[in-house]
Image (cartoon, rainbow, N blue to C red):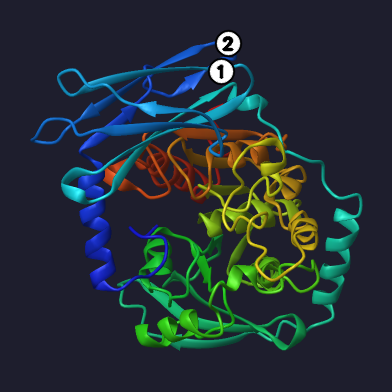
Amino acid sequence: MPSTYFRVSAFTFLALIAANVCRAQMVVAPDRTNGIYEVGDTVHWTVTWKGASNAPAAQYALKSGGLTEVGQGDLNFTNGIAGLETKFTAPNTMLVEVKWQPENNFDRAVGGAVAAPDKITPAVSPPADFDSFWKAKLEELKKIPTHPQLEKAEGEKAGVEYWKITMDNIRGSHLHGQIARPKKDGKFPALLIVQWAGVYGLQKSWVTDRAAEGWLALDIEPHDLPIDQPESFYQDQFAGPLKNYWSLGNDNRDTSYFLRMYLSCYRAIEYLKTRPDWNGKTLVVMGDSQGGQQTVMIAGLHPNDLTAALALVPANGDTLAPEIGRAPGWPQWYFNTDGKDPEKVREASRYYDIANFARRIKCPILVGLGLRDETCPPSSVLAAVSQIHSPKEIVILPKSGHQDEHGTQAFYNKRRYNVWLPALREGKSPPVNQ
């Protein structure tokens, strides 16, 4: 996953780095290093000032479920350390936010904890016609011939073959991607890679690195765009027709921007199954953030053929969470209603909520979430994975936000790249650590 959520300019990137350095001056931590508690437990929080000067005046806010403020006040530091207490009265998460103004430059830091993570469930039940809606959409897709078009290109990695690929999708749209495999005869395990949010091209290494390991790897664009245009092309798209793409058509389940994206994933899985170089046994999907959203979705929408799914900080979980005081996952349909009927947006969101796909998953799954994540809050991920009844390994990352800041997602990545993918590639059972 990239160091920033969207592709940004060099100036913005440097600004984000500076902000992270400032944030590191204040550390908010619960008294348990794993951040996991039981209902009834009291959490003793430590706020530590790491700056060279004396601790500045600072204020805290306590956010139950990452959304509902249940306390606030000033912090009192002694030798650069201040303390707080919170108590869990129900399965939930707690986000502690600290703000201060060093040298008139506003900054903030957060810490997170969770109680009874396996008992956090979605705010609402699935729509009664959820399954029939998606059955109809798959029927619509099946009427469109796949028409795969492959263009061989230089993969820039020894021992690997590489192609660009285009397929037809619903309503005149297209699926664009890249595919790579070992440069030798044989049949290989297949891996579908789906992308995080933003508008950007695809890097060849995202498939060629996996192909060098022995995978038949397919990486698909989330948008109906070519995969290898100059950076300025994608910036223009993001500033123009794809500005706030996640809100396009979001007041109607039939017009949501995510409809084409979700069906692209389905088509990609179906295509891999037709490849004569697939080994006919191992079929895996993985992605982060919006890619994690697509991973959970396709594992539920395509439950019978997948061997395993791997999703890090998956988005779009528990879309109606604010109705019970919790924060929803990006792109926060619940609040993203400008100029539209809020009730229509919220109703449409239920058909794209990963929690409603999660209950249909049959394959083993590896999921990672960060207790400091404010983009895809931990409660939104836990609510979704609570609906999974297949073997599952949930990696709770106590110091991680949405990004891999300072290696805070290292444990998940070790499980993914050093344990799960090698085992799956060798045809072994997914090494679920429950």
Residue with the mark numbered 2? 40
In the image, residue 4 above or below residue 179: above
In which quadrant will I find the C terminus?
A: top right
Q: Decide: marks 2, 1 in contact (CB < 8 A)?
A: yes
In terms of secondary structure, where does tag 1 sit?
A: loop
Amino acid type at circle 1 is: Phe
Amino acid type at circle 2 is: Gly
Q: Horizontal placement of 212 versus 284: left or right?
A: left
Q: Position of residue 155 (x, y in %)?
A: 36, 78
Nearest the eye: 89 or 433: 89
**Residue under the image location 46 percent in, 87 percent down:** 152
**Which badge, 2 or 1, comes first in the chain's sequence?**
2
Badge 2: residue crowd in 10 Å (few <14, some 14–19, many ≥20): few
Residue with the mark numbered 1? 88
Nearest the eye: 18 or 318: 18
In terms of secondary structure, where does tag 2 sit?
A: loop
Image quadrant where residue 293 sits: bottom right
Q: Horizontal placement of 31 versus 257: left or right?
A: left
Circle on res. 49: none
